[in-house]
Amino acid sequence: MGYYSSCSSYYSWVHILILATFFVAPDVVQCRVRHYKFDVVTKNTSRLCSSKPIVTVNGKFPGPTVYAREDDTVLIRVVNKVKYNVSIHWHGIRQLRTGWSDGPAYITQCPIRPGHSFLYNFTLTGQRGTLWWHAHILWLRATVHGAIVILPKLGVPYPFPKPDHEAVLILAEWWKSDTEAIINEALKSGLAPNVSDAHTINGHPGPLANCSTGGFRLGVEPGKTYMLRLVNAALNEELFFRIAGHTLTVVEVDATYVKPFKTDTVLIAPGQTTNVIVSADQSAGRYMLTASTFMDSPIAVDNNTATATLHYSGTLSSTPTVLTATPPLNATPVANKFTNSLRALNSAKYPANVPLKVDHSLLFTVGLGINPCPSCKPANGSRVVASINNVTFVMPKIALLQAHVFNIPGVFTTDFPGNPPAPFNYTGPPPSNLATSSGTKLYRLAYNSTVQLVLQDTGIIAPENHPLHLHGFNFFAVGRGLGNYNPNVDPKNFNLVDPVERNTIGVPSGGWVAIRFRADNPGVWFMHCHLEVHTTWGLKMAFLVDNGSGPNESILPPPSDLPKC
Ligand SMILES: *[C@@H]1O[C@H](CO)[C@@H](O)[C@H](O)[C@H]1NC(C)=O
Ligand SMILES: *[C@@H]1O[C@H](CO)[C@@H](O)[C@H](O)[C@H]1NC(C)=O
Ligand SMILES: *[C@@H]1O[C@H](CO)[C@@H](O)[C@H](O)[C@H]1NC(C)=O
Ligand SMILES: *[C@@H]1O[C@H](CO)[C@@H](O)[C@H](O)[C@H]1NC(C)=O
Ligand SMILES: *[C@@H]1O[C@H](CO)[C@@H](O)[C@H](O)[C@H]1NC(C)=O
Ligand SMILES: *[C@@H]1O[C@H](CO)[C@@H](O)[C@H](O)[C@H]1NC(C)=O
Ligand SMILES: *[C@@H]1O[C@H](CO)[C@@H](O)[C@H](O)[C@H]1NC(C)=O
Ligand SMILES: *[C@@H]1O[C@H](CO)[C@@H](O)[C@H](O)[C@H]1NC(C)=O
Ligand SMILES: *[C@@H]1O[C@H](CO)[C@@H](O)[C@H](O)[C@H]1NC(C)=O
Ligand SMILES: *[C@@H]1O[C@H](CO)[C@@H](O)[C@H](O)[C@H]1NC(C)=O
Ligand SMILES: *[C@@H]1O[C@H](CO)[C@@H](O)[C@H](O)[C@H]1NC(C)=O
Ligand SMILES: *[C@@H]1O[C@H](CO)[C@@H](O)[C@H](O)[C@H]1NC(C)=O
Ligand SMILES: [Cu+2]
């Protein structure tokens, strides 16, 4: 099938992007140490009527899939051959004691400058499933992203019947213009950036879009079962995923197993991954796959649906494609039905270790704001910002983890507020003053302390669903509701038995979500909205987790090639 797997040699992954085929999980061996090389290079493309250079890894869009097994150590040399500063984040990888390899620029590392390289070095401990990697600087992740497939340890089965074949499906977002020009224009004006021009499935918008280069085709054989590893790599939009005429069985999200359930629609937010099993149990033919936008508040979005085709072998060319309707753009009930169906598998082998005792009980408001900006003429002298607990995060000039470990003063403070500084009716009429404060504030946690964090949306400018991503940890989503979180009532309804475990969670529009995690990973860990526009506007903060006192409870020493600022 054109795949190649080796533990010890550098190679450029030959990604199988042949139309009308299916991917087969490579025959991945267990490696003590596994090597990859990522060359960050510019590549010309001609998709959606635009022929523009894009930044890629190894010239691929989407980028190469990293295949590995649980317990492998992965070494990935990233070589920067483009004009931009670059860093790569391994989204959802726990990075136990290896925060240096997490990747967010100016949080755990200084960027890799043009002409330089950095060796990411991490071990896959206690995780198996689909994750993904992406650039974590500027808006480069629009085209610099790919899947990470962590197979169970050799010989360990999936906790569900083994599918006959597997495929990676990366959902993404495409602008005809250069994405750096899009965000720079927005920052200058003070207004929201232009929405994208299309969504894509494995790099292709599909036959429904104008000027398409042909849609992605997933070839299937009648009677076989397929595991689709879905990744939402879009910058700013949550997506619904469907396959005409087929039921999907969800078995895993964010590389944690869930109690399998059947659905006709998957909801997937930027940053999230979802594994579904589909049986090729329909009559031979072509069936449409759709990735369509979910937005249940009055915010401008790209509502173009990306399409691909499930193509049965033996289909006559005259057979018409079976279409599917997409859920309405604002289909909150469809979204809720999916979200409420997610439960941790919580088996003897894969228990849900929900922290039952809480050391830090935190309430963070997440939302937008408006600050003065004299130069922002199009926005009449103001600009849209975003904040957590009214703090618009200011990016430091020196990476926070370095400042922490090397004791460099003046880079950050540890006074991030654990509660809103001035409580208000978060989901009611907005306060008269929409301004935010700003700073590079961290929240400090002792090693192994436990956190309950309620993320509360605000209605400032508009209520909106924010997919929050926490680096360095998985968390359990123990509760969720509409309106303002009520600490006297809502905890009674928390699910502390089998809540879904993940690394990215949607805070519902005009509502809240409660998560719990154990701070068992020393380092500095970013938490931010995975809508790139909100992150850019400042909806981000970081947790500082101290070393523990035990032998394996300190962050490892920094690698010698760590980039300098
Ligand atoms: C890529 O496109 C740019 C302009 O967009 C052009 O200058 C350059 O020659 C192209 N490179 C290749 C290899 O086609
Ligand atoms: C990777 O990190 C481990 C520590 O976790 C270290 O022992 C090893 O030498 C590193 N490998 C390389 C090639 O730097
Ligand atoms: C954003 O959209 C506006 C209006 O369509 C257009 O004039 C502008 O050129 C776009 N910006 C970029 C960077 O493409
Ligand atoms: C497709 O073409 C139509 C008609 O020219 C236009 O209105 C629409 O915006 C185009 N869609 C995309 C995705 O470019
Ligand atoms: C998609 O958005 C465009 C521009 O806002 C709007 O004109 C169109 O009606 C929308 N289409 C759907 C199906 O919502
Ligand atoms: C700026 O002010 C003009 C004139 O009052 C108004 O028409 C326009 O909508 C304002 N723009 C924004 C972004 O507030
Ligand atoms: C934590 O432990 C590491 C490794 O022992 C050490 O380098 C570091 O100085 C310790 N303290 C902090 C604040 O990182
Ligand atoms: C908050 O505002 C909403 C909407 O106006 C209202 O229904 C609710 O009663 C308010 N809550 C409180 C605690 O004032
Ligand atoms: C946020 O901070 C700004 C600046 O200090 C202040 O003016 C505003 O009232 C605060 N808003 C809230 C909701 O705390
Ligand atoms: C962390 O705390 C839990 C609960 O108090 C305890 O059972 C566990 O041993 C601790 N782990 C470490 C590494 O200290
Ligand atoms: C610390 O880690 C090493 C290497 O992974 C392991 O051999 C040792 O047993 C661990 N020690 C403790 C106390 O967990
Ligand atoms: C790249 O990063 C370095 C280190 O932080 C910084 O000094 C430099 O200005 C950055 N370059 C660009 C083009 O942003
Ligand atoms: Cu957001």
Image (spheres, helix red, strand yellow):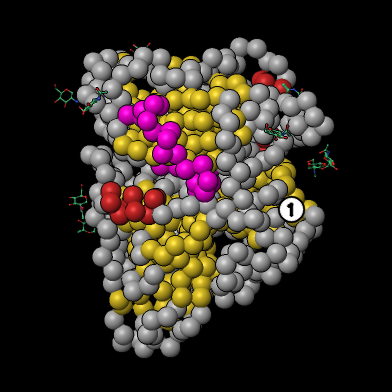
Residue 4 is situated, as x and y percent measured from the top left of the image, at 69, 67
Q: Amino acid at mark 1?
A: Asp
Q: For the magenta stretch, what is the residue range?
A: 484-506
- The main secondary structure of the magenta stretch is loop
Answer above or below: position of 119 versus 311: above
**Magenta highlight on residue 15:** no
Q: Nearer the viewer, residue 334 or 93?
A: 334
Quarter-of-image position of residue 319: bottom left
The answer, for residue 522, to whether it is visible in the render is yes
Is residue 533 shown above or below 292? above
Residue 310 is drawn in which quadrant?
bottom left
Relative to residue 66, is residue 182 drawn left or right? left
Magenta-drawn stretch contains 493 = yes
Work out whether 244 lies above or below 400: below
Q: Residue furthest top?
A: 410
Q: Residue at x 39, y 70 (%)?
A: 247
Residue 359 position in % (x across, y down)? 58, 25
Quadrant showing the C terminus: top right
Q: Secondary structure at mark 1?
A: loop
> Which residue is identified by label 1?
71
**Res 186 visible:** no
Residue 318, image x, y percentages: 31, 87
- Front residue of 509/433: it is 509
- Image quadrant in which the N terminus is located: bottom right
Q: How many marks?
A: 1
Dot 1 surroundings within 10 Å: few (below 14), some, or many (20 or more)? many
Left or right: 511 as drawn, with respect to 62 = left
Residue depicted at 53% across the width and 46% down the height: 497
